[in-house]
Image (cartoon, helix red, strand yellow):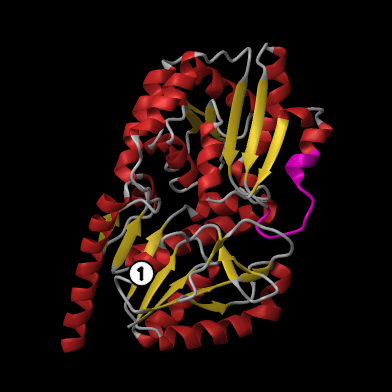
Amino acid sequence: MKLTFIHDGPLFYDDRGVYYEYAYHELFERYSYLADEITFMMRTRQIYGDKVFTPVPPQVKVVSVPDFKKPELYFRNKPEAERIVSRQVMASDILVLRSQSSVAQLALKYIKKYDKPYIIEAVGCSWDSYWNHGLIGKLVAPGMFFKTRSAIRKAPYVCYVTESFLQKRYPARGKTLSCSNVVLDEISEDVLEKRLERLSSFDPEYSLVLGTAAALDTRYKGQEYVIRALKDMKDMGYNVRYRLAGGMNGRQDSCFLRELSEKLGVSELVSFEGSLDMEQMKAFYDSLDIYIQPSKQEGLPRSVIEAMSRGCPVTGTDIAGIPELIRPELLFRKGSPDEVIKGIRKVLSSDLKKEAADNFRKARKFRRRELTEKRQLFYDGFLEDMKNKEKL
């Protein structure tokens, strides 16, 4: 059986032709339950220099689709993208499409043409994704919202990463599963004990370390609002530092966030950690006093769950799937430095040890064994329907 996973990506490749990723952990193992040949079809981009990404398993084939999302590239690249997508869909037995993807939207046309079985993974909101990308994004958002809504409504199988947010916004008629895309290995109780010990001597006026893990060139992640809040927090008496984990999606562009921190005169308070591997990320979360997710758009954020698994107190915006993870009392409204400060102060006024323990316990529902069993039961139904259809 041949399965193709379809998303916009990107995947990255070096000068040796080795592919890397930062957002598709676990997928080879997951889809191997459905098929014995796995292909990733998405945009690709070359990286230069030393970047910390996860190598794509060598068993995974990669089909590169040219970028046709940007208006200036649409007419130049769309015909070639059509040919590549059509050919790959025809050659596949199973297709897995990730929502909010132009390549996936294009693939749907050929899936219907060749009558191929498929699953849609609903991982984020098209409206939020486009609305938060300037004037052109706002013009495109309504159309993409209704395209995504229609695609999910008509899909025979839909896997949602949220428990309720995406289900309400993009309801499905077919068979559905609520199952997080974030999978955690078993977490030692020692992690929580070390966190509680750290909190015993915590004093935000002596030292307050905030952190966010997200791509630095994705403006809707909202790190800029934390940076804008730093000077006011320092004036309030907090000895605050802000650590940012994340890279530039393989680009060599100047970093808006770094330039902003210099412009506002708070660059000495901001630390850019770069792209970190899985073990480094654990150390990153352990170094924080509060993890903050200031996003203007999300699905169910991996970084919040990972921070919780390290017993880290968390706050974030009241959008998308974030309220499914963080107590309402600790949320704040998006797009405002003042709201960021409110969220941080809410956490500081809470029982931090209780928050740490509660977050650690909540993260356990994202353990590998529980989620794998849940997902494979869903896949069993999909495969059974495939067999029954072939018999007709």
Identified at 23% across, 57% down, the residue is 373
The kind of residue on which mark 1 rests is Tyr
The correct choice, above or below, for 200 with respect to 33 in the image is above
Q: What element carries label 1?
A: helix
- x and y percentages locating residue 234 in the rendered image: 70, 17
- Magenta stretch in the rendered image: 248-259
Residue 61 among magenta residues:
no
The correct choice, above or below, for 82 with respect to 371 in the image is below
Identified at 69% across, 31% down, the residue is 227
Relative to the observer, which residue lies in front, 329 or 357?
357
Q: Quadrant of residue 34?
A: bottom left
Q: Can residue 319 be seen in this view?
A: yes
User: Which SS type dominates the magenta stretch?
Assistant: loop
Q: Can residue 297 be seen in this view?
A: no
- x and y percentages locating residue 46 in the rendered image: 69, 69
Identified at 38% across, 45% down, the residue is 165
User: Dot 1 corresponds to which residue?
Assistant: 31
Identified at 34% across, 79% down, the residue is 36
Is the C terminus in the top left, top right, bottom left or bottom right quadrant? bottom left
Relative to the observer, which residue lies in front, 137 or 241?
241
